[in-house]
Image (tube, rainbow, N blue to C red):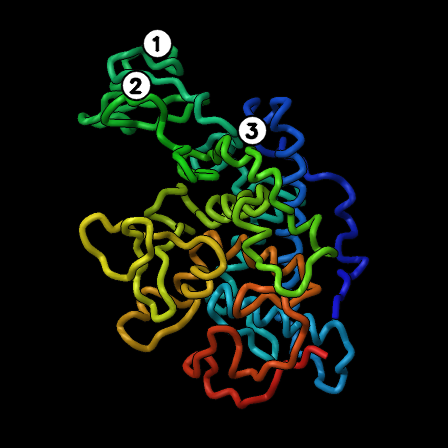
Amino acid sequence: MKLSLPAVLFAGLGLAADPNVWDFDESCQTSDRLDKFTKAYNDAELLAVKAQDDLKMVLEPHPDFESKESPRLRNWDRIARAVTNMFGFTPNKAGHDPNEEHYSNVRYVYDRMVKTLHDGQMVPENGYSGLKPLLMCDESKFVWVGRDDADPNDATGRPLHESRPKNIAPGHAGAWVYKKRYLASASKGDTPGLCRPGIWGITLTRYDFIVFCPHSFDEKASNTPSAVDSKDNVAVGDTLDSYSTSSLPRIMVHEFAHYFGADKTGGPENRDVKDQPAVGKEGKPIYTLNGKYTNKPGPGAKPVVTYDFLWCSNLARSHADELGANTGPSKSTFTAETYALFSLMSYMDNFDWADDGKAKEMKTIPYDQLPNGKRLRLEGEDDETFNEG
């Protein structure tokens, strides 16, 4: 059964989200990018607001089982499955504690995201570095400055290594510089090396900038349906990845999760929502070797990071053995992709996406059979069911 979003949900969202709360770089405002960027940014706002709204709902007790036709009951159950599937913890049927560690970690990210995208109030107000946070769409804006060259941002024209001793270590040949961001490097190269093949975007919180790579505006990305546009056209069996992998709104929520998941100076030594290593269903790290996935490390094997539904779902699983250190809510609440996919699952709420990442009509699922369910997560709960009508 398809359920429509409550009409009041997006009251107040009539005005378009304004990217000018950031330092909105000219590289995103070219004739071939501006419309795509603006649409995706607006969609990212809607996705973030809906994710936050869903998370608020599980703070309430699970609705009475007698109200089987109540959308609130079905929504509570749908949200609980999505939370378990993406973030690895099971909402409490008595109403989840907002101060519970994993829940509060997730809300921290979405609340800051919504504050910026929807309310138009940048968080943190002055960035992590004191610079106005920058959104850009082309790394070619960076200019190489050698260590002995004059620092373009130094009033006295001192050599870079003298003006920026904290940035330029003895082994650095110089830095790529743009808008007072200094990306030090041991060698010059042709580019800063941020937008490599297959990379949609890069977030460097300590430098207060996000670059959405040109790849994010190519034909593949343009032809990927947005969850916002596609909600009412979803069919049973559709995969969540078909609305996410190369979708610019998904890319934006992913990068924003990196940015808003940080704190203090934004460095990796602080709070850090990263791209966690991907794991298999048993919790073993996954690598690529000769174009194939393997759980065996070795020469030439490259670690895979957590992207797309399968890897997010696997990361959220809890394991009682030594592999448990690789997975579970302590990992899945600190990886960016789970935030992106949960927002899609929240917005396209006329279907259940949990467990296999495919659109399914609502069904009754026993509480102990939640996605990736493990008895150790349920803390002795009985086998009552979630009823989806």
Mark 1: secondary structure: loop
Mark 2 or mark 1: whose residue is earlier in sequence: 1
Q: Amino acid at mark 2?
A: Ser
Is there CB contact under 8 Å for labels 2 and 3? Answer: no
Q: Residues within 10 Å of mark 2 (few under 14, many from 20)?
A: some
Furthest toward the bottom, the residue is 382
Query: In the image, 167: left or right of 305?
Result: left
Residue to which mark 2 is pinned: 163
Mark 1 or mark 3: whose residue is earlier in sequence: 3
- Rounded to the nearest whole Å, what is the CA distance between mark 2 and mark 3? 24 Å
User: Observer-nearest residue: 303 or 59?
Assistant: 303
Q: Amino acid at mark 3?
A: Asp
* Horizontal and vertical percent position of residue 253: 55, 47
* Horizontal and vertical percent position of residue 133: 51, 33
Count the marks: how many? 3
- Determine which of the numbered discs, if any, sits on residue 44 in the image: none
- Determine which of the numbered discs, if any, sits on residue 23 in the image: 3
Q: Amino acid at mark 1?
A: Thr
* Horizontal and vertical percent position of residue 212: 51, 35
Residue to which mark 1 is pinned: 156
Mark 3: secondary structure: strand
Q: Nearer the viewer, mark 2 or mark 3?
A: 3
User: Observer-nearest residue: 135 or 187?
Assistant: 187
Mark 2 or mark 3: whose residue is earlier in sequence: 3
Is there CB contact under 8 Å for labels 2 and 1? Answer: yes
* Horizontal and vertical percent position of residue 311: 43, 60
Is there CB contact under 8 Å for labels 1 and 3? Answer: no
Establish if 215 lies above or below 165.
below
User: Observer-nearest residue: 310 or 68?
Assistant: 310
Establish if 180 lies above or below 337.
above
- Rounded to the nearest whole Å, what is the CA distance between mark 2 and mark 1? 9 Å
Task: Tell me the residue at 41%/81% (across/down).
Answer: 376
